Every structure is written in C-alpha cells, then in structure tokens.
Image (cartoon, rainbow, N blue to C red):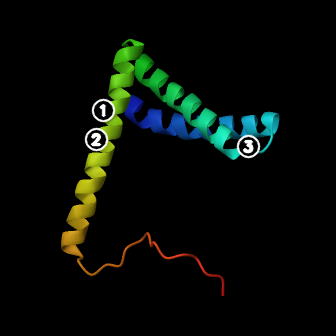
Amino acid sequence: MLVTAAGPILYALVLIISTSLISFVIGNQSATITSLGLIIAFVAWIYVFKRGFETGWIKAVGIALFAIVLFVFMSIVIALITHVLVPNLPPMITTQSFRSV
C-alpha cells in the first residue's frame, strides 16, 4: 500500500526538482524541460514500483501503465456519475477565448 502512495508523491517531487534543475542548467526552453522532466519522473515512478513490488523493469512498466489506465477509467466514471447527479452544473473547462477586461 505504501508503494501506491509513494509512487505519485515521488513522481511529483522528481518532476518539480528535475524541471527546476534542467531549467537552471539549460535555460528557459519549456518544451524540452517539460519533456525531460516527465521522462525522468516516470522512470522514478517505475523504480518505486520495481523496488516496492520486487519485480523487474518490464513488470514495473506494466504496473505503471495499468495504474494510468485505471486512473483515467475511474476519472471518467466519477465524471459521469457527477453529471448524472448534478446535470445542470456548468463545465469547469471552457472553450471560449480569454478576454482581459
């Protein structure tokens, strides 16, 4: 159970720290920094699964991908249930352009 909680926490920490360090070393190239940070954080998350479940890298990648798919599925189910229970709720994300007043 600790592995499941520690994985996302470590992912967030590694993402924040790695993007900050890469930004400091390379300069402000946001797409490159974000891509490298995401890759490094994902590898750290997989490493937590590898160590916690005492498995190999391939199985750890499978666990991580399954966790992502399960998270997306549960998010969709929760959104659908919320939509059924509160049908007139306005959307949180709008597609209108931002206009400064």
Mark 1 crowdedness (10 Å alpha carbons): few <14, some 14-19, many ≥20: few
Quadrant of the frame with the N terminus? top left
In the picture, the disc for residue 40 is none
Q: Quick one: SS at disc 3?
A: loop
Taking depth in this image into account, of 54 and 27 the one nearest to the observer is 27
Taking depth in this image into account, of 40 and 26 the one nearest to the observer is 26
**Figure quadrant of residue 19:** top right
Q: Quick one: SS at disc 1?
A: helix
- Mark 3 or mark 2, which is nearer the start of the sequence? 3
Q: Is residue 29 left or right of residue 37?
A: right
**Residue located beneath label 2 in the image:** 70
**Residue located beneath label 3 in the image:** 29
Check if mark 2's residue and mark 1's residue have beta carbons within 8 Å: yes
What amino acid type is highlighted by mark number 1? Phe
What amino acid type is highlighted by mark number 2? Leu
From this view, report whether residue 7 is shown above or below residue 79.
Answer: above
Disc nearest the viewer among 1 and 3 = 3
Disc nearest the viewer among 2 and 3 = 3
Which residue is at 45% across, 25% downward? 46
